[in-house]
């Protein structure tokens, strides 16, 4: 019987900040747009958005474990444990855990739809669950074709931030879409670091991730760009806030996270590989979470 500790490790906790960070920024964007503070219902809606995002992240992690495991692409890898690939749990149990997580996300999402009346979110939620499963599942997984980064940017950047803001404001705003970009880029950096670590084993297994297609050198350059571009975007938004009250000038608070970006960028640029990239993965996750919390606070305080 698989222990709770192994199930927790199989959920890949280092990646979970990627689900909560965009919810925080979406809530901050809504606070700026509404310009009247938070209300009890807002807290419930934000909590439900966090449940949706977290459950989807756990679901996609278990789904990847299952699909990669039955394909045999997880037989020789570094990093977190692979429940199926290492024979630690029956494949059907891991698949069931993925579906259970997707079910939690669907239930929380349906509750959001009932509360907000935004019925179009049903289509968004269905698309998110389908994208999570077919990332490595199905006959033609798009994660094996180098498109995983697109999925992460769209669903853990644009959809998560703008969707949270929409639940709190009643519709998608330009500000939420703009703020979703830096959050999405940092989420992509997490995946790039992960795929850089596994680039050789992925190639051998026929898993043509973006890192496998670009090669190590260009993947390292991409990672560094993904780490620093969010700060440039936030700085530009903050400058716009000095010129117009339509933008949050205090978003500049996110720049306090710059020191957290220096270490992973330096390590990847310096040729970190193998287990060193596991450390980079953790540092990048921490960067995304701190950056997003600071951005959310700064935007929330920029009431006009």
Image (cartoon, rainbow, N blue to C red):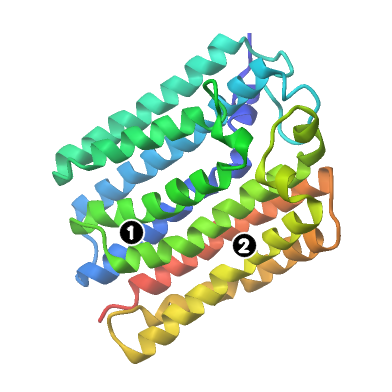
Q: Which dot, 2 or 1, sits closer to the camera?
A: 2
User: Where, by quadrant of the figure, is residue 93 drawn?
Assistant: top right
Q: Position of residue 186 (x, y in %)?
A: 57, 58
Where is mark 1, residue-wise?
27
Name the residue located 61 percent from the left edge and 55 percent from the top edge: 286
| Nearer to us in this view, 223 or 280 | 223
Secondary structure at numbered mark 1: helix
Where is mark 2, residue-wise?
226
Sooner in the amino-acid sequence: mark 2 or mark 1 = 1
Left/right of residue 16 with respect to residue 175 in the rendered view: right
- Looking at the picture, does residue 291 appear above or below residue 144? below
Q: Are marks 2 and 1 in contact (CB under 8 Å)?
A: no
User: Where, by quadrant of the figure, is residue 287 drawn?
Assistant: bottom right
Q: Position of residue 34 (x, y in %)?
A: 21, 68
Q: Is residue 84 visible?
A: no
Name the residue located 33 percent from the left edge and 59 percent from the top edge: 27
| Nearer to us in this view, 45 or 208 | 208
Name the residue located 40 percent from the left edge and 54 percent from the top edge: 158
**Label 2, label 1: how far apart the Cα atoms are:** 23 Å
Q: Position of residue 86 (x, y in %)?
A: 74, 18
How many numbered discs sit on the rendered protein? 2
The crowding category of the residue bearing disc 1, from other C-alpha atoms within 10 Å (few below 14, some 14 to 19, many at least 20), is: many
User: On the rendered image, what quadrant is the C terminus found in?
Assistant: bottom left
| Nearer to us in this view, 74 or 275 | 74
Left/right of residue 269 with respect to residue 261 in the rendered view: right
């Amino acid at each position: 019987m698989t222990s709770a500790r192994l199930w927790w490790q199989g959920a890949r906790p280092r990646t979970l900040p990627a689900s909560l960070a965009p919810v925080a920024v979406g809530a901050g964007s809504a606070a700026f747009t509404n310009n009247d503070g938070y209300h009890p219902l807002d807290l419930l809606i934000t909590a439900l958005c966090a449940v949706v995002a977290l459950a989807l992240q756990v679901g996609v992690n278990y789904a990847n474990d299952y699909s990669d495991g039955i394909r045999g692409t997880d037989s020789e890898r570094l990093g977190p444990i692979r429940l199926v690939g290492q024979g630690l749990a029956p494949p059907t149990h891991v698949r069931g855990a993925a579906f259970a997580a997707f079910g939690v996300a669907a239930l929380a999402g349906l509750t959001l739809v009932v509360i907000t009346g935004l019925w179009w979110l049903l289509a968004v939620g269905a698309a998110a669950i389908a994208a999570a499963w077919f990332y490595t599942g199905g006959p033609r997984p798009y994660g094996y074709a180098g498109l995983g980064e697109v999925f992460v940017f769209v669903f853990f950047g644009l959809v998560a931030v703008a969707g949270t803001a929409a639940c709190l404001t009643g519709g998608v705003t330009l500000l939420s879409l703009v703020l979703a970009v830096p959050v999405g880029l940092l989420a992509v950096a997490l995946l790039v670091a992960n795929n850089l670590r596994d680039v050789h084993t992925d190639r051998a297994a026929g898993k043509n991730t973006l890192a496998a297609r670009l090669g190590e050198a260009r993947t390292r350059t991409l990672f560094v760009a993904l780490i620093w571009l969010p700060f440039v975007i936030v700085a530009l938004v903050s400058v716009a806030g000095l010129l117009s009250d339509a933008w949050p000038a205090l978003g500049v608070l996110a720049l306090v996270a710059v020191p957290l970006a220096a270490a992973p960028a330096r390590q990847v640029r310096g040729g970190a590989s193998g287990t060193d990239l596991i450390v980079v993965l953790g540092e990048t996750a921490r960067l995304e979470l701190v950056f997003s919390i600071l951005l959310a606070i700064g935007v929330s305080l920029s009431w006009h």
